[in-house]
Amino acid sequence: MASKRDFTNSEWELLRDSAEWVFAAMSGVEKSGLFERRRENLAFDKYVDEYDSRDPIVDQVLKEQNEAGQHDKASYDDAIAQLKEVGSLLDKKVSDAEGDAMRAFLMDAAGAIADASKESLTAKSARSEEEEKAIAAIASALKATDGAERARQTRERLARERAADARAEKAEAAADAKEAAAREAQKEAAAKRAAERRQAAAEKAAADRQKAAVEARAAARRAKKASEEAATKAAEEAAAKAAAAKQAAEQAAAEKAAAAQKAAADAANQAKTVLGKAAGAVTGAVAGAADAVATKAEAATDAVTEAVAPQQEVKTYTIQSGDTLSHIALRFYGSANRWREIAAANTDVIKNPSMIYPGQVIKIPNA
């Protein structure tokens, strides 16, 4: 199997540039326009880039290939002469199979250039007679034989097989991708269902917490209301008891005062009667004495009345948390409307009846 090491530098340069000499020969067939020349260049570059060969000589030539146009200044005759040297070099340096592979590569390049030069925007035109003659001259110069044609056909067959393998690999990759996508979709669906279950559970837990909070607030309100009602009832009962006790005390004091007044009046009348029966001679003195006794009796009556009369008592109360003047009035007087009396008696302590504070000591005037 031949390799680059089997050629001299000049021989390798000739072989390396052989595709360029094919391009020069095809370009020199007839005077091409600017756009035709551009299409030929693009077709040649594309052909070289996409050409796939398993022959080591062709593969190495492809790796060192330059862009088309390196020898585009050469004449048609010069290009054919160089290709004849290439044909002779292949006969001397490489095996028949390797030579056929190289000749097939070069002949296919000539065909690609010829087809590109006549390609329009809508269709390909037939090759001209000059192009066919040039392709025949290139084949003759390269000593292309049926073996080269067989090599070309073999390359095409291998290319078709590789294309079929590529399509099969692509289809298999597509199937794998589809299967992977299906698995991923299943995973996403499962994850979505799990997330929905978690969301539902979280929402239920939140609803349960909210319900429990509502019930707790309702229970707290009921408990507070019951406590307030119990406190109000206790305050009312205490106020009623205090009022009853006060009324009983006042009634007892009034009864004692009335009894004392009656006793004093009876004593005074008795004294006046006794003195009136006394001797007339003692008129002035006895009368003065009687008056004095009457005056003393009245004074004693007044003293007893004053002593028995209930004293105006002033109570004190220390304000507790939650108290209002209305609650305090209800507690001590049995009526919440008497809060103004408490406020009036404590102007030195209470500046604003609506603002009282735990710990303040206030006076509770007697009713």
Image: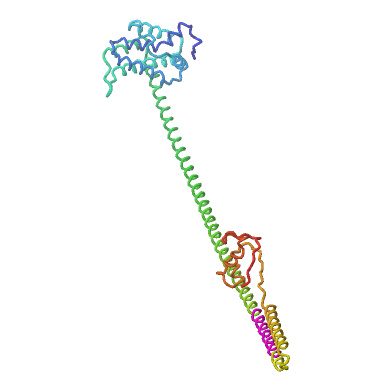
Residue 312 found in image quarter: bottom right
| Residue lying at the far front of the rendered structure | 281
Residue 150 found in image quarter: top left
Q: Which residues are magenta?
A: 249-271
Which one is in front, 200 or 26?
Answer: 200
The main secondary structure of the magenta stretch is: helix
- Counting from the top left corner in percent of width and height, residue 69 is at 37, 11
Quadrant, the C terminus = bottom right
Residue 189 is inside the magenta segment: no
Residue at (41% x, 10% y) in the render: 17
Which one is in front, 207 or 67?
Answer: 207
- Horizontally, is 303 left or right of 159 in the view? right
- Horizontally, is 327 left or right of 146 in the view? right
User: How many marks are shown on the rendered structure?
Assistant: 0
Which one is in front, 111 or 150?
Answer: 111
Which one is in front, 65 or 162?
Answer: 65
Residue 259 is inside the magenta segment: yes
Kindly tell me whether residue 68 is visible in this rendering.
yes
Residue at (36% x, 12% y) in the render: 23
Kindly tell me whether residue 80 is visible in this rendering.
no
- Counting from the top left corner in percent of width and height, residue 263 is at 69, 87
Q: Is residue 199 above or below residue 357?
A: above
- Display colour scheme: rainbow
Residue at (66% x, 84% y) in the render: 258
- Counting from the top left corner in percent of width and height, residue 39 is at 32, 17
Q: Is residue 324 above or below residue 262?
A: above
Residue 22 found in image quarter: top left
- Counting from the top left corner in percent of width and height, residue 201 is at 53, 54
